């Protein structure tokens, strides 16, 4: 049973606009949430994370929001740039292990 | 620093053949992981090693074995490959401690089993 879900397989956004990626989870024991970015033929790279005791974390153009009561997190990218076109994975951490969502493919249109 | 390296990058096997995927990290990390990525499934954990000398099953361990050779190296073995094991395999490593939950990934091995 998948504990982390990304229900939107793809997202297309115009350059300069906001990209919003969503993620839902079921396990209340997750204590850390991470977003990874993946380009074709490369391994995932860490983008941003948030502790379960916070509700927002910001790093430049990237902001992650956590709503623990709804078991929901989102990643906002503002403004979106062509280099942001990639697959984004939501991941949740419990102890040593990460559980990943299926990923959302973001395409930024010029 | 090379980070996490994986060999080979590509491999084609016939059903029933065996092979070992190699992974090494130069970041002095304690924990290492093997994942597989399949379309629409995200990354699924096969096996992990929380520290040198220990290994544990992940979500999808059937058909695989692992060896934590030393702190740097963690190998994944397919004893008798099956077409269902066609996938992209990623190795990852992580430092100790709850504040270091970030895992660092290698570039992947694309495996096809015919």
Image: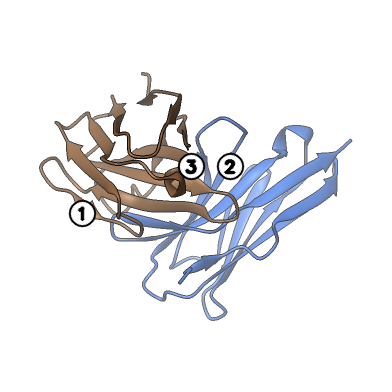
Q: Which residue is mark 3?
A: B87
- Can the viewer see residue A17 in this picture? no
Q: Which residue is mark 2?
A: A37
Position in image of residue A90 (x %, y %): 54, 56
Same chain shared by disc 3 and disc 2: no
Looking at the rendered image, the disc whose residue lies closer to the viewer, 1 or 2, is: 1
Q: Which residue is mark 1?
A: B56
Please identify which colour was used for chain A in the image.
blue
Looking at the rendered image, the disc whose residue lies closer to the viewer, 3 or 2, is: 3
Chain letter belonging to callout 1? B
Question: At x 10% / y 42%, what residue is drawn?
Answer: B53
Q: CA distance from mark 3 to mark 2?
A: 19 Å
Is the C terminus of chain A in the top left, top right, bottom left or bottom right quadrant?
Answer: top right
Q: Quadrant of residue B80?
A: top left
Q: Quadrant of residue A52?
A: bottom left
- Most foreground residue, A37 or A15: A37
Question: Could you say whether the residue bearing mark 3 is in a helix, strand or loop?
Answer: strand
Please give the label number shown on residue A14: none
Q: Relative to A23, say whether A26 is above or below.
A: below
- Asked whether the beta carbons under mark 3 and mark 2 sit within 8 Å of each other, the answer is no
């Amino acid at each position: 049973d998948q504990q982390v879900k990304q229900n939107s397989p793809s997202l297309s956004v115009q350059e300069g606009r906001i990209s919003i990626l969503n993620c839902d989870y079921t396990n209340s024991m997750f204590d850390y949430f991470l977003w990874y970015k993946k380009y074709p033929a490369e391994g995932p790279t860490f983008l941003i994370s948030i502790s379960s005791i916070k509700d927002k974390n910001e790093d430049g153009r990237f902001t992650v929001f956590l709503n623990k009561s709804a078991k929901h997190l989102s990643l906002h990218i503002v403004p979106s740039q062509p280099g942001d076109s990639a697959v984004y994975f939501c991941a949740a951490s419990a102890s040593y292990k990460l559980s990943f969502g299926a990923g959302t493919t973001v395409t930024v249109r010029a | 620093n090379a980070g996490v390296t994986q060999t080979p990058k590509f491999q084609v096997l016939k059903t029933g053949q065996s092979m070992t995927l190699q992974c090494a990290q130069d970041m002095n990390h304690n924990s290492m992981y093997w994942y597989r990525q399949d379309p629409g499934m995200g990354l699924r954990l096969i096996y992990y090693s929380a520290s040198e000398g220990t290994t544990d099953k992940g979500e999808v361990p059937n058909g695989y074995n692992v060896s934590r050779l030393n702190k740097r190296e963690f190998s994944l073995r397919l004893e008798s490959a099956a077409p269902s094991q066609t996938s992209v395999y990623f190795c990852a490593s992580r430092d100790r401690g709850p504040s270091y939950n970030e895992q660092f990934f290698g570039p992947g091995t694309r495996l096809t089993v015919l």
